[in-house]
Image (cartoon, helix red, strand yellow):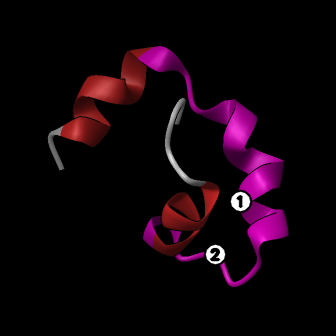
Amino acid sequence: MAGKRLRTVQVLGGHASIKTTGKYSHLAPDYLKPAVVSL
């Protein structure tokens, strides 16, 4: 998620609250980035 706007990630994640997105944002390991980018 590095460099991505938290609001964008909130919408894509289906979170009603930006607080929820922030709570889980640290759980996105870098090795998953290629999979997310390909979506």
Tag 2 near tag 1, CB within 8 Å: yes
Most foreground residue, 5 or 33: 5
- Picture quadrant where residue 38 is located: top left
Q: Label 1 is placed on what type of residue? A: Thr
Mark 2–mark 1 distance (CA, rounded to whole Å): 6 Å
Q: Secondary structure at mark 1?
A: helix
Q: Is residue 36 left or right of residue 7?
A: left
The residue shown at (39%, 25%) is 32
Q: Secondary structure at mark 2?
A: loop
Q: Label 2 is placed on what type of residue? A: His
The residue shown at (64%, 75%) is 15
Q: Residues within 10 Å of mark 2 (few under 14, many from 20)?
A: few
Mark drawn on residue 6:
none
Residue holding disc 2: 15
Q: Is residue 7 left or right of residue 26?
A: left
Relative vertical location of residue 30 with respect to residue 15 in this rendering, above or below: above
Q: Which residue appears farthest toward the left when viewing the image? A: 38
Mark drawn on residue 21:
1
Q: Is residue 19 left or right of residue 3?
A: right
Residue 30: % across, % down: 48, 17
Q: Residues within 10 Å of mark 1 (few under 14, many from 20)?
A: some
The residue shown at (25%, 25%) is 34
Q: Which residue appears farthest toward the bottom when viewing the image? A: 16
Q: Which residues are magenta?
A: 12-30
Question: Is residue 5 within the magenta segment?
Answer: no
Residue 28: % across, % down: 58, 32
* Mark before the other along the chain sequence, 2 or 1: 2
Question: Is residue 28 within the magenta segment?
Answer: yes
The residue shown at (55%, 53%) is 5
